Amino acid sequence: QKEVEQDPGPLSVPEGAIVSLNCTYSNSAFQYFMWYRQYSRKGPELLMYTYSSGNKEDGRFTAQVDKSSKYISLFIRDSQPSDSATYLCANVDNYGQNFVFGPGTRLSVLP
Amino acid sequence: DSGVTQTPKHLITATGQRVTLRCSPRSGDLSVYWYQQSLDQGLQFLIHYYNGEERAKGNILERFSAQQFPDLHSELNLSSLELGDSALYFCASSGGGRDTGELFFGEGSRLTVL
């Protein structure tokens, strides 16, 4: 079992849809959870960062963490074509040094 | 702009050659990570340095080596290059435990081996 797993997609949705991206992890040592957005052939960009279980909202984006089930979600409201990218789930342990990335989910938002 | 600078942005070379990729971390960040991303593949962790010392190694080939200098910039050396080494190489930096461990990426160095 990989430490961090994501459905690779591709996921195609119409513009304006609510997108749900999911990620599971296996290592209980992970304490910090991040979502990165990576446009084609660009560096991953930190999108959302959270520590505790629960929800964190930033504009159209909401990150949800459930540590009891080791499940992480990213919701995108009112999706736009500019949201088309690969979304990487990443976890890090309490020492802030052991980063583990999921394989990413490719999202296409169709106009 | 993440604050992480990588050079060169693009590099084309031949098999058997050696190249050096350079990374300047964000100001104040002590940790530097190197990742390899082949076409349509995920990020493969190569190596992690913290304040000049190697902290962790991932799937890094013996033909590859890295170091972090006293000014905290880092270099990734790739030698005896093969076609399969063609990829995007990303550098990322973080506070290394000083803060909450957010990782910031550079724009990458695109290596093409012909």
Image (cartoon, rainbow, N blue to C red):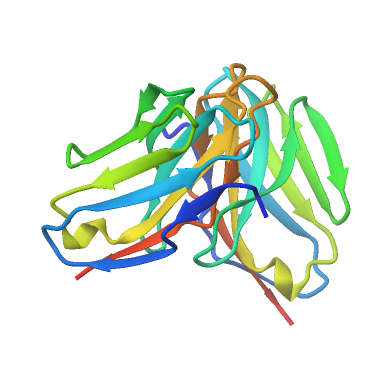
In this rendering, position of residue B73 left or right of residue A64: left
Name the residue at the front extreme.
Answer: B71
Image height of A72 relative to A96, above or below: below
Question: What residue lies at 30% left-to-right and 50% top-to-bottom?
Answer: B20
Image height of A77 relative to A14, above or below: above
* Of A66 and A63, the residue lying toward us: A63
* Of B92 and B68, the residue lying toward us: B68
Name the residue at the bottom extreme.
Answer: A111
Q: Percent position (x, y) of residue A89?
A: 60, 43
Q: Percent position (x, y) of residue A11?
A: 60, 65
Asked where in the image residue B102 lies, by quadrant, the reply is: top right
* Of A104 and B66, the residue lying toward us: B66
Question: What residue lies at 67% left-to-right and 51% top-to-bottom?
Answer: A21
Question: What residue lies at 41% left-to-right and 60% top-to-bottom?
Answer: B8
User: If the image is split into quadrants, where does the N terminus of chain B sit?
Assistant: bottom right
Image height of B109 relative to B75, above or below: below
Q: Percent position (x, y) of residue A36?
A: 63, 49
Question: What residue lies at 33% left-to-right and 43% top-to-bottom?
Answer: B76
In this rendering, position of residue B20 left or right of residue A60: left
* Of A64 and A48, the residue lying toward us: A48
Asked where in the image residue A39 lies, by quadrant, the reply is: bottom right
User: If the image is split into quadrants, where does the C terminus of chain B sit?
Assistant: bottom left
**Is residue A82 visible to us here?**
yes
**Is residue B59 visible to us here?**
no
